[in-house]
Amino acid sequence: MANTQNLSITSNLTQDSAPTSGLAFDLGVVLLFISLPLFPEFSKGLTVAIAVFYSLYFLGIISPWLKNIRWLPPVLLLLGVAIILRYYRTLVGYEAGIALYTMLLSLKLLETRNKKDFNSTVLVGLFLIVLQFLLNQSLPKSLYMLPLTVALFATLIQAQRAKPLPRIEVLKLALRLVAQALPLMLVVFILFPRLSSPLWSLHLKLDRLSGRSGLENYILPGAIGRLVLSQEVAFRAELQSPPLPASKLYWRGLVFWRTKGLYWHGSAPKYLPPDQITKREGKVKYRIILEPNGKRWVLALDLPAKAPKGTKLQPDLRLLSKNPIDQRTQFFLVSFTDYQTGALDAQTRIAALQLPLKKFSPRLKNLIATWQQKAHGKPDQIVAQALAFFRSQGFVYTLSPPALRPHEIERFLFETKAGFCEHYASTFSLLMRLAGIPSRVVGGYLGGEYNELGKYYLVRQSSAHAWSEVWLEGSGWVRVDPTAVVAPERVQNSIANNLGDIGSPVAFRSKNFPLLERILHTASLTWDAINTRWHIWVLGYDNKQQDRLLDFMGLGFLDHVGIVSFVVLICFGVLAIVAFILAHQKPQATDIIVRLYQRFERRLSRIGLVRLNYEGPQDFAKRVMRNRPDIKSEINTITGLYMRLRYSKYSLPDDLQKLKQLIQVFRPKRYV
C-alpha cells in the first residue's frame, strides 16, 4: 500500500466536468450577496432582471435541463443591455459600467458548466468586489466584503479538491490563506507610492453630490432652516486643545456682501484688499475633515490664520479649496478665537454699505434715526440699540416662519416678527448699513457635538447658521449674532428636528436622554469615532502621510523609484523565506481525514508503536494488532474507517463523524 503522504490529489472538477450542485449553490449565494449592495444604485428594472437571472441559475441547479436551452443566455443578455441603455443611455462610464458588469456576472453563472467556467466566474466575482469600492469605501462596506472574499476563495479551493471538505474546514483554509497574505498587503499599502488622490476618487462627478444638503452661495429666508431637518454630517473637527466653549464654536464658511433685503449673495469683489489681522489670541490648531458636498468652501473656526495647502484665503477671511470637495477631505488649520482686524479702506467700505434699490418706508427710517439719536452717533451703541430692539419686541426664533419675499424686510420687522437665523442675520446687517455701519453676512455652522471617544466635534447640517459682522472703528470686523439675543439657548444647544406650527418657537434638544435613547446615542457616537479613524488612517492615507512615515522610518531620502525597488525587494525576500520554509519542512496534511489519522499515529507512537516509512495503513495496523491484541478491535475499526474514507468512493455519510469520535477517545496505554 502506498504511503498516504505521497498520494496524488486529483481535482474535484476536471476541465470538462460540471460542478457539484452544492458547490454551484455556494458560488451563486456568495455572488448574490456581493451584488446586493449595488441594487439600490440600479434602476428597479435592472434590479428585477438580475434577481430573475439569479433565480434561473438556482432553478437550473435543481433542474439541469435549463442549462441545455442554448438560446436563453443570449436573449437574457439582450434584455439586460436594453434595460441598462434605457436607464443610463450608455454602456460606458463608471455607473453604467458597474451595472453592466453586475448583470453580465449573473448571466455568466448560467453558463458555468465546467471547471474553467467555474474558476473564471470566481475571478469575475472578486473583481466585482473591487468595483464596489468605487462607490463606497466605508468601514461597514469593508467589513461586509471581507467574509464574502474569504467565501469566494473557499469555493475556489473546494473546486480543486479530490473530495469536498466540510464547509467549515474549507472556510478555515481560505481564511488562513487570506491571513497569510495580510502582512505583504500591509507592506505594499504602507510603502508603495501613493497617488495624490485615491484611485476611487477618479470616478466622482459633481452630479452625484448635487442631492446633498449643505450651505448654498446665497442667504434666502428658509434656506438654512431647511438644513436643520438634515442629520447629515457636514464635517468633523479634531482640536489639539481641550474642548472650547460653545460661544467660540463659530465655523466660518461663506461671506455675503450684496443684498436685496432678506436675500444676500455674492462674495467679496476681487478688487478689495485682504483684511488684516492686527491682534491674534486664542490660537487653536485643529484638523477639519469635510464630507463631500461638491462645493469649494472650507469650514474653519472663526478666524483662520492662514490658508492650508490646497486652499486660498479670500480677502474677507474665508477659505476656498482649489477644487470642489468631491470626496472626504481633511485640512490642518490654525485659527484665532480672539482677534482684531485693521483699518477699512474706501473700496471695502463702499462694498460693505451697498443697499437695495428699493425705497424704505418712513417707519423704518425713523427707527434707524431713533437708534442713532440714543447712541449719539456711536456705531457700537447703535449696534447695542438694534440688539435691544430684537430682544424686546417679541421676536420669535422659529423653523416655520410665515412666508416672506426677499424684499419684505419691513413686514418681518414690524408684522410677522418670526424667523430663523438667516432672517435675523440678513435683517440686522441691512439695518446696520442703513445706519451707516459697514456690515456683511457670514454663513457657516454653530456649535457641534463633542465625541468623547474620538476627541472631535461632530457637526451636522442641522448646525448650519448665519450671523453678522460689522466694522467698528478700533475693533475692525466684529461678529454680532442677533439670533443669540432672540434665542440665547441656540448658542449652547442644538435644534430638535421638528418644524412645528407656523410661528411656533424652535424646540432645542434635551441633554437628558431617556436611558434607551442615551444608550443608542452613545453607540452611534462610538461607531462614528471608529469609522472616522478608518477614513483618517486608511482611506485618508495619502502621499503626505506616507512621506511623514518614511521620514520617521529613516527612508525619507528615497524617491518613488527607490520606494518601489525597496517594496519589490521586501516582497522577493518574503517569498524567498516562504519558499525555503516550504522546501525544508515535512509535508503537512491539509485533509481532515489525513489529519485525524496522523493524530491516531501520534497516540500509538507514545506507546512505542511507530509506523515505518515503508508501511501503509493496513500493514501498520496488522503489526500493531499482533503486538497489542488488547486494542485490536479499536485499531481494526479506525483503520477500516480511514481506508474507506480515504480511498473508497462508497463511504457512508456518518463515517467521518465516527472516525473523529473513535480517535478522540482512543488512549492506548503501555504494557506494564
Image (cartoon, grey):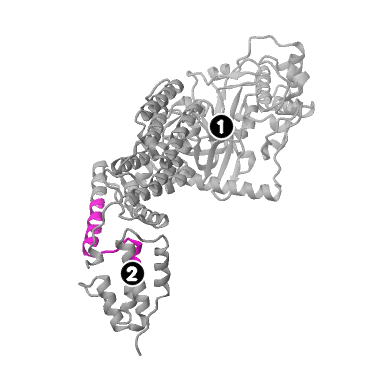
**Quarter of image, res 98:** top left
- Residue 181 seen in the current view: yes
Amino acid on which the number 2 mark rests in the picture = Gly
Q: Position of residue 165 (x, y in %)?
A: 37, 56
Please give left or right for residue 285 compared with residue 118 in the image. right
Residue 662 rendering spot, x and y as whole percentages: 41, 72
Between 65 and 314, the one lying in front of the other is 65
In this view, 16 is above or below 471: below
Q: Which residues are magenta?
A: 570-597
Of the pair 561 and 603, the residue shown nearer to us: 603
Q: Quadrant of the N terminus?
A: bottom left
In reply to whether residue 591 is colored magenta, the answer given is yes
Q: Nearer the viewer, residue 82 or 233?
A: 82
Residue drawn at 33 percent across, 69 percent down: 640
Which amino acid type corresponds to the residue marked 1 in the rendered image?
Arg
Q: Main secondary structure of the magenta part?
A: helix
Figure check: 126 above or below 69: below
Describe the element under mark 2 as helix, strand or loop.
helix
- Check residue 640 in the rendering and tell me which mark sits there, or answer none: 2
> Picture coordinates of residue 473 (x, y %)?
61, 26
**How far from the left and from the top, in percent, is residue 297?**
50, 29
Taking 453 as reference, is 9 left or right? left
Can I make out residue 373 in this image?
no
Q: Which mark is residue 252?
A: 1
